[in-house]
Amino acid sequence: FSCTRSFCQGSAVYCSEQCRDDDLDATCGGQHSRRRCRFLGLQRRRDRGSNSNRSSKCNDGRPGVQIVTGQGEAFPQYQECASSGTYEPVPGDEVECRTGETGTIVQYPNEIDACGSLLVQLDNRNACILCDIDALATQTPERMGRANRSEGVQADATYQWMCGVRCWYNEKDYRQAMVHFEESLDTIVWEDDDDGDDSNEGNVSNGGEDEYYREMLRPPPLRTNDNQTRLHIARRAYFLGACLLDADRTKEGRKWLMRSLRSIPTWEDGPFMVADSSAAEVDCLAQNSVAMELALSYEEAGEVDMARHVAQWTIETGIGGWTDAYQRPGYLYMGENNSVRPYTPPEDPQFPSWCRALEQESDTILEEFLALIGGDRSPCSSEIQQPKHWPTVGSGDHRGGGGANDHRVVGEGGDWREHVLFGSGAAHNDRIAPRTKALIRKHAKDAVELAESGGGEVIFSVLAPGTRIAPHCASINVRLTAHLGLVVPKAGCQMDDRGVFKCGIRVANEWHTWKVGKMLVFDDSFEHEVHNDTNEVRAVLLMRFYNSSISKEDRELIMTECQRLKSMETTKRYNPPLPKSYEELERIGLGLSQCPRCFSSGPDILFVSDLSHAGATVVCRRCM
């Protein structure tokens, strides 16, 4: 950068501190000003909660890096920290700057009067530039991979993680455990490390799809070719991200979930799952746990478009089993004959014949419904009131805790009530709606079977005027849902300018509405939402039933496996993963195996002792 000021004496190699401290109107165009040339600056690391540019490894006795450091002055002088176990720039290193230009380090800052800048030879043009070390965007993948695989980094990361595991199991101090988990993962050099400003990290939805893909389609933040290492780090990042979401630290939680997703190896990266891989590792990939957690964080925040972007990214990168961005169940059955359609129209050959039989009996079912909501009432929708004596959906009390989270999808001020005929919460009293129950047992045996196995329900469902059910997906895709219209608002079939019914249901990207005495059949594993923007109630008979493409012989096996995986995922969700060397103990903690001495299992029996940088001992608490 040529400078005509006397301070620089016309040098294009370096600029003196006096010139840099001068005003921005200098004839050098401010390139030697407090703006630090034309680089935005990306600092290597920071102390947690500190404004210093010093590496977080320099103040606590652990290895540091050679960096520019200081206490807030505009242009801190070059200082040298302890020998680095991570990044230590040396002449000849290949580097990349925030501008996207790549080059090779020619000289250290202390070798030239540059007040903390490196001299870098650019690759794409015959020129040298001054570049602050904290303006380096990244190292080469090879150098980062070597650092992350180094014994020092791995030992430090494992030690901090096991400190967290000890707090989690021994002391039940979950907050302190999370501090150690963050310290462990911060030991790793991530490709997306920046200057410590996390204001946009994990909060990309404001920029829409383009910004999300710019974030997610970057190279893996853990730049190492060791796929097993990447997989283990991805599991840790997933667990930390989920913990942060539970602690209402949504932005940070999403950041770690994104890092986990980008770290999970795909088949294009080469083999990473071997015959003895733990069920936890396989589940992390096969059940798409990380993507589900991230997508749900957006769903619950009302950012459903971002949830679809998460799903689309997993589809494009081959992670998990999702095949449609609108279909995001936690468990995806991939059966050979499993038909995939969001909505089944009445004229379709796959439309269940028993639905037509129940349509013929809709007057009987409506009569018993009206009796249940309180005496003899007219079937006119304008005269029917919300049954306040019925339990609200998601209250959980009448279902013994089942469906306790369903209330989260009900919009503010909404009211969704139910009366359970079959399934969790049913009264088991055939004097209640006896003819309706008899008709369902006769014509919809599959629905009764599924409800009594715990995989579905048959209910009278009533939405109050002005109630909205937020977009969401069911947890499994082995069932379909049928609604028999009982009470439909007169204005429900009216559409707004967007083609949305005043009282309707969106399944995937299409809106539908109900008709009195007619069935509406859809797959609730696809994203769906419900609006009742009228001043009248909407009531349906809701039934879940097995997808007809699943044979009767496979139903019990599939549901049992689904419930097993959901149970294991819940256990894994609240128990930190252990290093590879403790795989069998992790299996015992997850309930997949038993202690060979006392035959106990479950997370409560794990205990960490003799913890040091050299390793730790994890034992069964009952056998100590």
Image: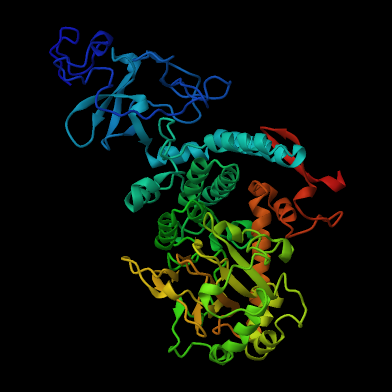
Up/down of 310 relative to 349, above or below = above
Q: Position of residue 378 (x, y in %)?
A: 57, 80
Q: Quadrant of the C terminus?
A: top right
Residue 520 appears in the picture as rendered:
yes
Left or right side of 275 for 593: right
Whole-percent x, y for residue 262 in the image: 45, 50
State the scheme by which the image is colored: rainbow
Q: Quadrant of residue 196?
A: top left
**Is 615 placed left or right of 382 in the picture?**
right
Which of the two residues, 384 or 75, is positioned nearer the viewer here? 384
- Can you see residue 278? no
Which residue appears at 56% of the width and 33% of the height? 152
The image shows residue 305, relative to residue 35, as above or below, that is: below
| Residue 36, image quadrant | top left
Residue 43, percent from left and from top: 40, 28
Rendered location of residue 10, percent (x, y): 14, 13
Residue visible at 40% across and 57% down? 305
Quarter of the rendering containing residue 398? bottom right
